[in-house]
């Protein structure tokens, strides 16, 4: 099921506790929460370039203004780059996990983020064929017995799940198993870029070695 506009709007509340570490002196016209919501929504949609964050914001400005204060319009790519260069990854991840758990609990569904639906026609994909780029991530699924963790590897062109593994914890073993299943199905001549955050699961020597031994480029943001 696709993420709805209401789901994206609720992200603001989950990120509101992140402290603004920008210098008190100087001119910073854009509100922190607006920069974070636009940037993270773009990343969840499968794009991680700062130029695309700006494009996404401009293409969806009318909708974003229904719940974000954007007194100076959409931030430019340099603003996104500055904010995400100092933002604490742990705080961002915690906010996103809270948001994902809330969405799953309220609706009883797992998240399937369709980048083409969220971005609309304003953003153009950077991947022209399957197995050129993968995005790795972890979410929770609401079940009658709790909230198991689901590790997913998504092909950024087809938006299909290339590999997955469900487990009881966030330990690196689950993401490693999802990667093993994905690599097993990868053709010999394909070398997709592997995108992920800097979570300990993806930074572990075992995980990185699995990627580099197959010749896959690694990109951590």
Image (cartoon, rainbow, N blue to C red):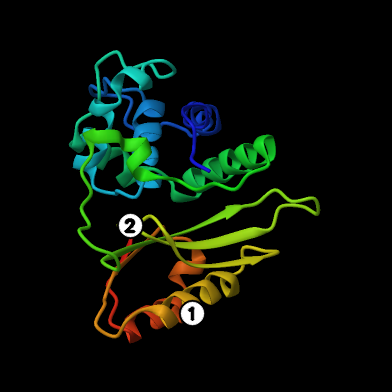
Q: Would residue 42 be seen by someone viewing this image from the given angle? A: no
Residue 209: quarter of image: bottom left
Please tell me which residue lies in front, 33 or 51. 51
Tag of residue 180? 1
Please tell me which residue lies in front, 162 or 153. 162
Residue at 46 percent of width and 28 percent of height: 5
> Would you name the residue on which mark 2 appears?
156
Residue at 28 percent of width and 70 percent of height: 192
Q: Which x, y percent locates residue 167? A: 66, 66
Q: Residues within 10 Å of mark 2 (few under 14, many from 20)?
A: many
Kindly state the secondary structure of the residue where label 2 is placed.
loop
Residue that lies at the very extreme toward the right in this rendered image: 145
Q: Would residue 45 be seen by someone viewing this image from the given angle? A: yes
Q: Which x, y percent locates residue 22? A: 34, 32
Residue at 48 percent of width and 79 percent of height: 180
Q: CA distance from mark 2 to mark 1?
A: 18 Å
Q: Residues within 10 Å of mark 1 (few under 14, many from 20)?
A: some
Instruction: Examine the rendered structure and indicate whether residue 186 appears above or below residue 197.
Output: below
Instruction: Examine the rendered structure and indicate whether residue 208 appears above or below residue 95.
Output: below
Tag of residue 71? none
Please tell me which residue lies in front, 23 or 213. 213
Tell me which numbered mark, 2 or 1, is placed earlier along the sequence.
2
Instruction: Examine the rendered structure and indicate whether residue 110 appears above or below residue 175.
Output: above
Residue at 67 percent of width and 64 percent of height: 169
Image quadrant where one finds the C terminus = bottom left
């Amino acid at each position: 099921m696709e993420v709805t506009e209401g789901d994206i709007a609720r992200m603001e509340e989950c990120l509101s506790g992140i402290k603004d570490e920008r210098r008190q002196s100087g001119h910073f016209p854009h509100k922190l929460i607006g920069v974070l919501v636009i940037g993270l929504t773009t990343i969840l949609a499968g794009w991680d370039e700062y130029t695309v964050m700006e494009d996404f914001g401009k293409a969806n400005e009318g909708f974003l203004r229904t719940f974000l204060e954007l007194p100076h319009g959409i931030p430019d790519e340099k603003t996104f780059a500055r904010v995400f260069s100092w933002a604490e990854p742990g705080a961002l991840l915690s906010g996103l996990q809270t948001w994902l758990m809330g969405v799953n609990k309220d609706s009883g569904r797992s998240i399937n983020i369709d980048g083409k639906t969220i971005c609309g026609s304003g953003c153009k994909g950077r991947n022209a064929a399957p197995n050129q780029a993968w995005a790795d991530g972890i979410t929770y699924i609401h079940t009658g017995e709790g909230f198991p963790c689901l590790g997913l590897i998504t092909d950024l062109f087809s938006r299909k799940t290339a590999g997955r593994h469900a487990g009881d914890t966030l330990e690196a073993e689950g993401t490693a198993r999802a990667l093993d299943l994905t690599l097993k199905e990868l053709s010999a001549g394909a070398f997709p870029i592997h995108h992920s955050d800097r979570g300990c699961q993806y930074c572990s020597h075992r995980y990185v070695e699995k990627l580099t031994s197959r010749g896959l480029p690694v990109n951590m943001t």
